[in-house]
Amino acid sequence: MSLFWRIFLLNAVVLLAATMLLVLGPVTVSTPVLATEAVILAGGLAAMLVANAVLLRIGLAPLDRLTRAMTTTDLLRPGPRPAVAGHGGIAELITAFNSMLDRLETERGHSAARALSAQEDERRRIAQELHDEVGQTLTAVLLELKRVADHAPQPVRDEVLQVQETTRGSLDEIRRIARRLRPGVLEELGLTSALTSLTTEIADHSGLSVRRRFDPDLPDLGDEAELVLYRVAQEAITNTARHAGARHLELALLRTPSGVDLRIRDDGRGLHGTTEGAGILGMRERALLIGAEVRLGPGPAGGTEVRLSVPHHDGSR
């Protein structure tokens, strides 16, 4: 039965009951209406309205749950679907909404995978060009500056050497950027070595005191999951160095019964209700690609804690 007919029949039942009471009951209405009759009519009207409201509330309660689900659903934080309840059109509406969420999450996952894959390819290309083109050019400039410094008189030699040091610093910075764009150490030496290199580099440039903890015998998660772990750690550590005002950072990669947990804690100023920016949204997107979950909140001793829980699937490689 459609929603229209259910509401219509509910109202028809209430009105029919009121009519039968008026026709078959001892109550009559005078002209003009007496005070006692007005009181009885008002009571009957109130009873009909209350009965109608209660029946409609019961019948439309599943729609209220569906409305709350519509206003709170976040595709980056999948949650339980609204329970299919009610009759007729209401149950069909909830079923259609759940199916729509399934399609949206699937399409979002495919779109995010394509976008992140293209992003990694572009990062790899830029890193390669920085290393091959700009890096080699600056290396040639350094060699030429050394040759000039060897033959230049003393006043000029000092200036050339200063330019040489500036150029060498620029070359080191370009190499550092290339490593961040394309973590070659992740491919060559594995996740723990890549995270160690990342935190060491951040500590050298930001002054953070970093403490690391890696559980032994971590499960083999696969290339895609390891890249997600690395990128989430990279984003979280970069946010700490730039915005948190922290002095200490703790990174832990722990084995759990279901997989691996990455935990990054700092002693900075914390979140304090700040909105999630593109970096945090990017972490959530990456986590969903491998069925993982990112949680952000205050750390045990203040500051901020970022936690990424990655499930382990056998045969992931």
Image (cartoon, rainbow, N blue to C red):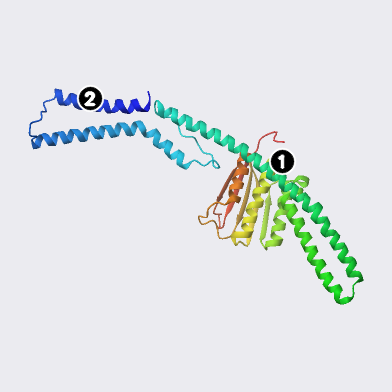
The C terminus - image quarter: top right
Circle 1: residue type: Asp
- Given residues 67 and 223, the one toward you in this image is 67
Report the residue marked by disc 1. 223
User: In whole angstroms, how far apart are the C-alphas of marks 2 and 1?
Assistant: 70 Å
Residue shown at 62%/36% (left/top)?
Answer: 110
Q: Residue 199's x, y, as percent?
A: 69, 55
Q: How crowded is mark 1: few (under 14 residues within 10 Å), some or many (20 or more)?
A: some
Residue 194: tell me if it is visible. yes
Circle 2: residue type: Leu
Secondary element type, mark 1 = helix
Taking 37 as reference, is 283 above or below it?
below
Report the residue marked by disc 2. 16
Secondary element type, mark 2 = helix
Residue 257: tell me if it is visible. no
Given this view, does label 2 or label 1 mark the residue nearer the observer? 2
Residue shown at 37%/28% (left/top)?
Answer: 3
Q: In this view, does 204 lie to the left or right of 78?
A: right
